[in-house]
Image: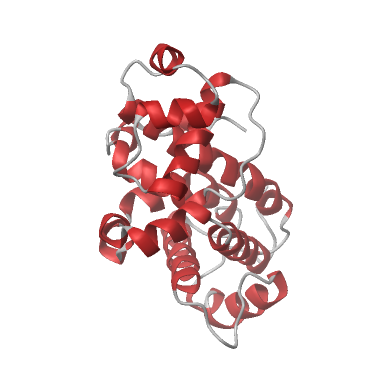
Amino acid sequence: MRRLSQAWPLPLRQKGAYCLTVMGAIAAGERRHSSTGPERVADAALACIADHGVRAVTVERIAIEAGVSRASVYRWFPGGRNDVLLAAGRHEMTRFFTEVEPRLAAAGTLDDVLAEALSGAVCFLRDSKPLHALLANEPELVMPHLAFDRMGTAFAVAAEVAERHLRRFLDEDDACRATELIARLALSHTLSPSADLDVGDLDAARRHVHRFVTPGLAPLTDSPRS
């Protein structure tokens, strides 16, 4: 799979460092060992957000967390803090889609694609330490980017992968509608979990989309298109 940092269209890249940072924080779960210096710095930035909040993140703090020098950070990211935060967002969104795309590709029905997308997103968001830290300590920074009328950037990123798989079953308009609906459901069930429905469970997610999502769509065929 192409790295999404390379595949994103120019308008999306121009949205700015902060929104991508929030998206990266949302996607970030447990840190894994990173093999390169820039990846360690990106991981360190998200760890700093989880520990100290967005406002307190500095190049110096990121360098200490990453175990590298401040000069190295600026060598890899000449734009300093904003460049690091952009990279952190891209790094985590790439990590998320690297995990979920093989499951979408293997899904054999429309219900399966939607359920894998919903379940995978909820599980990833649910385990995000930076997201929960932001919601607890700096909600005024993160909540505007989670409002339904301001999620265009998040939907554009999700569409990079999800729509490609949905178009095996749906026309372009319905694929876009389904992508947005699943993103909204995932966010709602993450921020306000249901007491009697855990869509992080794949079987529960499949039953939910079969009953409430796919009836509003118009599949082109009962079988995936080649």
How far across and how far down the image is residue 85, in percent? 38, 34
Q: Residue 150: horizontal and vertical position, in percent? A: 27, 58
Query: Which quarter of the figure has residue 131?
Result: bottom left
Q: Position of residue 175 (x, y in %)?
A: 48, 58
In the figure, is residue 110 to the left or right of 92?
right
Decide if residue 6 is in sight here: no
Viewer can see residue 96: yes
Identify the residue shown where x is 37% and y is 42%. 20
> Which residue is pictured at 47% across the width and 70% down the height?
185
Q: Is residue 89 left or right of residue 119?
A: left
Identify the image quadrant of residue 9. top left
User: Where, by quadrant of the figure, is residue 86 drawn?
Assistant: top left
Q: Nearer the viewer, residue 125 or 209?
A: 125
Measuring from the top left, give residue 148's x and y in whole percent. 31, 65
How did the renderer colour the structure? secondary structure
**Residue 155 vs residue 198: left or right?**
left
Quadrant where the N terminus is found in the figure? top right
Residue drawn at 59 percent across, 41 percent down: 95
Q: Is residue 98 above or below residue 87?
A: below
Q: Image point 56% across, 59% down: which residue?
A: 121
Q: Residue furthest bottom?
A: 196
55 above or below 116? above
Q: Is residue 85 above or below residue 97?
A: above
- Count of marks overlaid on the render: 0
The relative height of residue 50 versus residue 87 in the rendered view (above or below) is below
